[in-house]
Image (cartoon, grey):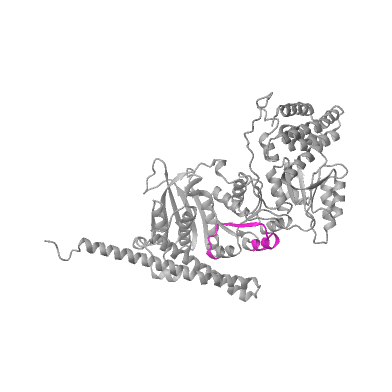
């Protein structure tokens, strides 16, 4: 006979259904309240920003700043409540992206630096050598867990240190055949806790005790959210602590290592896109530059607000990637200035700060908010999406291009590229003619070679800048050169140029440059040519030598390796043969000045024709000529390589 107090199966099912309905109702209530409170709070935050921009008195500015911090804090609490509601209702899903572990940890320490002001605390990291550089995971949620644990550690530590330790020494989870285990520990020298307190820490709305809630603030949701996130990742979380000594919060998760050699086919194509990166952290800046350049972007990086502002005033970029915490100002203020100066430059905030108020502000400005660390693909896709919004820049003055170039074969290449792009330009042969073209008022932009007869490119830009002194005018001058040194920003800016194009210039780079300066309308991307053209293999005399003509570079430069391009290469041979004869005559006469000048012209012509080996030999001859040192057999080497180039071109068929 059954116990009358024992509930029946039907009663149990009814109770479970009621509990599920109550949990769903609670989650819906939390989510609704979070959304309903967030909407007016965002308006409050926006109005406070408008008041701040009116440049109020110091007293009012201080009050506005305090109110903004409070509003931002409330928005963060609302985010916690919304996250909790989503997880409680099983509506949250984890993303799977690349996570650069070391960048993540060091970025978090950088972001948490603002929270240790007034305290004698060192923020450290201790990452074992066998920890992979990149894993697969959800970078946003992994960052959220670590920052929450870090925030608690800093809150309850007055002096000493807080350390992020990462190892493969897991004590709870076991790695499988296709994954490894990572153990994250946040170690502090704070007030510590008793075992009894540790047991209830990961429950919703729970803190150590009521006194800590009053003293330190917080909802008690953070650790509960961390536990739910770690559970979703298939991991475990816990804490070890001793009162008066400190605490170690830890969590372990399974992870898969990602090879750092990403297949280029998997990365976005950023060919020809110009990017300005304003990032003061040396390692972070290096990662941004290396990542985006690997996708074909032209990236320039500087570490300060002032340098970023000066550069954006000098020339347009397709995209500017700005960090928030710069040594001489806030990235948000720099973004506001850029929107006034370059309204058609796409803008991205790429920062370690996870600030709901800041994110709202940037969204209102139409600026993409990207939290570090993004995956390589994630960063590339963000740049690609941003540049899709870029349209023609407004350029004062005539919308016409003049090109100063003394080498006939280079003029021929540039002329054919412009014809391909549907852009008209006039050519002059030396610096004196370039100045005359500038003074005519007919042109709005100058593209100039460096070394030219009668007046070189250095003197041209010097005279133009001298004429602009004490005026608000600025005439864009772009240097076209085969000198790699000139491509460094500090070098060409110091001479007064606005931008640098290195020979050989790809069609994509040329197109983007013309669009940046308002000489081309935004248009559909030119179809990539078939790189597997039916071209006979070269007959090389030395298998160790690179190809005499870089076919891939030619295709990128001219759009295809067709009959028109091959005709251009034949013309290169005809135009360059007199220069080669002149080089050999100068070598026989030991005329270093003539060697230097002729080698310079040959170098530019060779690199424009993608005859890179010949260009490198001529660069060596030019260098010896400038230093006044003997060139040895370099002239004969150049003649031999010229013959190899000629033979290769003669064998080419469309």
Residue 11 quadrant = bottom left
Q: What range is drawn magenta here?
A: 333-357
Residue at the image position 42 percent from the left and 43 percent from the top = 179
Q: Nearer the viewer, residue 460 or 254?
A: 460
Question: Is 216 positioned to the left or the right of 13 in the image?
Answer: right
**Residue 622 image position (x, y, % from top left):** 79, 36
The quadrant the C terminus occupies is top right
47 versus 331 height, above or below: below
Percent x, y for residue 175?
A: 39, 44
Q: Does 349 lie within the magenta span?
A: yes
Residue at horizontal 30 percent and vertical 66 percent from the top: 18
Is 409 inside the magenta-drawn segment? Answer: no
Residue 170 vs residue 223, the one in the foreground: 223
- Give x and y (percent) for residue 325: 60, 59
What residue sits 33% from the left and 67% below the top? 22
What residue is at 58 percent from the left and 74 percent from the top?
Answer: 63
Q: Position of residue 510 (x, y in %)?
A: 71, 46
Residue 409 visible in this rendered orientation of the protein: yes
Using the image, determine if residue 406 lies above or below residue 219. Answer: above
């Amino acid at each position: 006979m059954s116990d009358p107090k024992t509930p029946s199966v039907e009663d149990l099912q009814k109770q479970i259904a009621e509990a599920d309905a109550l949990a769903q109702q609670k989650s819906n209530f939390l989510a609704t309240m979070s959304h309903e409170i967030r909407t007016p709070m965002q308006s409050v935050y926006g109005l406070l920003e408008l008041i701040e921009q009116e440049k109020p008195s110091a007293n009012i500015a201080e009050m506005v700043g305090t109110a903004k911090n409070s509003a931002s804090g409330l928005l963060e609490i609302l985010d916690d409540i919304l996250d909790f509601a989503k997880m409680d209702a099983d509506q949250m899903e984890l993303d799977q992206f690349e996570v650069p572990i070391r960048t993540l940890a060091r970025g978090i320490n950088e972001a948490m630096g603002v929270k240790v002001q007034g305290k004698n605390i060192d923020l450290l990291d201790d990452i074992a050598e066998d920890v992979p550089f990149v894993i697969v995971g959800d970078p946003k949620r992994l960052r959220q867990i670590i920052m929450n644990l870090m925030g608690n550690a800093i809150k309850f530590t007055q002096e000493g240190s807080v350390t992020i330790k990462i190892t493969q020494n897991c004590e709870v989870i076991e790695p499988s055949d296709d994954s490894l285990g990572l153990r994250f520990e946040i170690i502090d020298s704070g007030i510590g806790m008793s075992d009894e307190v540790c047991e209830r820490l990961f429950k919703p709305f729970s803190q150590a005790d009521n006194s800590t809630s009053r003293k330190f603030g917080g909802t008690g949701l953070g650790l509960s959210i961390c536990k739910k996130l770690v559970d979703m990742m298939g991991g475990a979380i816990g804490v070890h602590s001793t009162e008066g000594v400190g605490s170690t919060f830890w969590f372990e998760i399974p992870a898969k290592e990602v090879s750092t050699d990403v297949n280029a086919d998997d990365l976005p194509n950023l060919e020809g896109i110009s990017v300005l990166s304003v990032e003061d952290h040396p390692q972070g800046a290096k990662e941004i530059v290396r990542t985006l350049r690997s996708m074909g972007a032209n990236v320039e990086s500087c570490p300060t607000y002032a340098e970023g502002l000066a550069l954006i005033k000098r020339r347009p970029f397709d995209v500017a990637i700005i960090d928030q915490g710069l040594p001489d100002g806030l990235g948000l203020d720099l973004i506001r200035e850029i929107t006034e100066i370059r309204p058609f430059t796409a803008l991205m905030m790429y920062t370690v700060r996870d600030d709901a108020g800041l994110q709202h502000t940037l969204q209102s400005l139409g600026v993409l908010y990207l939290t570090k660390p993004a995956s390589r693909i994630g960063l590339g896709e963000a740049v690609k999406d941003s540049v899709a919004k870029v349209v023609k820049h407004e350029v004062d003055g005539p919308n016409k291009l003049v090109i100063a170039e003394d080498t006939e074969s280079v003029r021929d290449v540039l002329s054919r590229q412009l014809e391909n792009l549907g852009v008209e330009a006039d050519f002059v042969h030396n610096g004196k003619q370039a100045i005359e073209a500038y003074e005519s008022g007919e042109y709005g932009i100058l593209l100039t070679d460096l070394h030219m007869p009668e007046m070189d490119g250095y003197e041209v830009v010097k005279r133009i800048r001298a004429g602009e002194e004490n005026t608000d005018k600025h005439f864009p001058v772009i240097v076209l050169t085969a000198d790699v040194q000139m491509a460094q920003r500090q070098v060409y800016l110091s001479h007064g140029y606005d931008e640098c194009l290195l020979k050989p210039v790809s069609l994509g780079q040329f197109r983007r440059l013309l669009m940046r300066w308002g000489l081309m309308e935004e248009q559909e991307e030119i179809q990539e040519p078939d790189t597997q053209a039916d071209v006979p293999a070269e007959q090389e005399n030395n298998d160790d030598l690179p190809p005499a003509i870089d076919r891939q570079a030619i295709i990128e430069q001219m759009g295809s390796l067709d009959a028109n391009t091959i005709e251009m290469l034949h013309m290169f041979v005809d135009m360059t043969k007199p220069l080669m004869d002149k080089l050999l005559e100068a070598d026989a006469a030991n005329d270093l000045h003539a060697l230097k000048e002729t080698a310079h012209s040959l170098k530019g012509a060779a690199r424009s024709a993608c005859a890179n080996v010949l260009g490198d030999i001529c660069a060596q001859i030019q260098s010896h000529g400038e230093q006044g040192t003997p060139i040895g057999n370099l002239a004969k080497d150049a003649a031999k390589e010229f013959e190899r180039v000629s033979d290769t071109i003669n064998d080419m068929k469309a």
